[in-house]
Amino acid sequence: MTPKSWPFEEARKVADRLAASGKSEALFETGYGPSGLPHIGTFMEVARTSWVRHAFGALTGQTSRLLAFSDDMDGLRKVPTNVPQQEMLTKYIGMPLTAVPDPFGTHDSFGAHNNAELRRFLDSFGFSYEFASSTEYYRAGTFDPMLRRILAQHAEVVAVILPTLGAERAATYSPFLPVHPKTGHVMQVRIDETDADAGTIRWQDPADGTRYETLVTGGHAKLQWKADWAMRWAALGVDYEMSGKDLIDSVKLSSQICRLLGCPPPVNFTYELFLDDRGQKISKSKGNGLGVDEWLRYAPPESLGLFMFNQPQRAKRLFFDVIPKAVDEYVTHATKSREQDDEVRKTNPAWHIHAGNIPATSATPLSFGMLLNLASVVNAENPEILWGFIRRYSPGATPENQPFLAKLVAGAVAYYADFVRPTKSFREPDATERAALEDLATCLRAMPHDAPAEELQNILYDIGKRHSFPELRAWFGCLYQVLLGQTEGPRFGQFIALYGVVETIGLIDAALTRTKQSV
């Protein structure tokens, strides 16, 4: 029976495809357009495809490969806003990305720089993949047989695309883009003649009227996007590739062309797009949204994996405020996995994120949300301030024997400094809330300093019920807003146990004194 999780559901489709084709090894592919710096969406596609690939292996026992393909022979269409030397780059509009100078000055070309950035953070996450360069594949002749097949079926391929184009664009469309033999530009021009026997196309330079005959093989020409995608699927025998909702129509057209070439298109999975804080699609050329390195400043990579894993076919905001929840959800799943049998564990997101080997070090006695609230109350400037409280709550805990907790502590301090502290806003309690807070302080004074979290939580429930709150949620909202200056927070009983009974009494007294003086 196939485990009930979306990677296994996708893996079953790949297994069925291989059974029908007779292939013994599956080829998974992800695509990357290096016209801008890699962003979190690029990483997401490799991560999700890797989870399907691992599920395929677990389901079938068959081998597979993952090809991370870079479309680095594409022409530079516009200058990204998040790179240096903007004016220099404008001179290279229309040139293949591997022929555009690197504005960072570290690689042979802009395409090579961005390819290296892609590999750097894929490697840092331990993905198993093979990198492939469009420029290298075109120039090496890897695509030559399929390019000649497209040339032989030029009219049929054009007929697939024409209904999707406006009148002006349709008048000049060809799937082939010759590379100018003198300037090196990728030319989007009308193809006047095709010669399938010679393997050439004839076209005219609109700048000076010069006519050229160009081979479609050997990197002298490349294909336009939808035809290029189809050609790659057919030439390489791709079995699986996922893509965003914005490419649904492109998948349909490329699949038609792939069938024209005599090959079945791969299994496709359509995911929803990530949105920035304004609800706009994340774009590598705009550099909006949240980057991988930015996420990792505040939280461990496992939490990013969890955010990627959940509900891939639902649009989600990807901004800093989603990080705390993602961290704690990951911790919850990793903790549950230790009590699950092998089959149930395969439905656990942590099983997929760690390729079946969930590390024991992912355990933590404290949630990220709890650490954030502690950092907020003590105004933590560095991790050691938090460790003083943690050692009292969990004796013997150190950064050395609790490495995952150490990551959370460092991330909580950074997140507090950048996002919580600037927005903290305390409010005054009303009469009911003031009476309840005074009641809480009185009850805490009667408690031992080492009172357990559950007992403290029960006292909080009792106080909430004794006073005229419409619901317990309103009482806990009072604690967060009056004492912590935040709209939400942790289980407050555990917070008191961590922060300290005496210290919490002081926190209440200070809040009541502060609000009394402001009246």
Image (cartoon, rainbow, N blue to C red):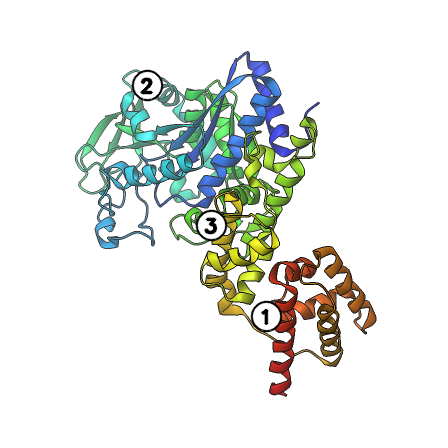
Earlier in the chain: of badge 3 and badge 1, it is: 3
Q: Which residue is mark 2?
A: 196
Judged from the image, the secondary structure of the residue bearing numbered disc 1 is loop
Can you say whether 34 is above or below 129 in the image?
below
How packed mark 1 is, by other alpha carbons closer than 10 Å (few <14, some 14-19, many 20 or more), is many
Where in the figure is residue 391, as x and y percent of width and height? Answer: 56, 53
- In the picture, residue 106 is in which quadrant? top left
Can you say whether 79 is above or below 47 in the image?
below
Q: Which residue is mark 1?
A: 485
Relative side of 242 to 366, left or right: left
Amino acid type for the residue under numbered disc 1: Gly
Can you say whether 154 is above or below 207 in the image?
above
Amino acid type for the residue under numbered disc 2: Ala
Can you say whether 49 is above or below 12 in the image?
below
Earlier in the chain: of badge 2 and badge 1, it is: 2
Quadrant for the N terminus, please. top right
- Can residue 187 be seen by looking at this rendering? no
Q: Nearer the viewer, residue 92 or 358?
A: 358
Q: Which residue is mark 3?
A: 295
Outermost residue toward the front in this view: 448
Q: Nearer the viewer, residue 507 or 273?
A: 507
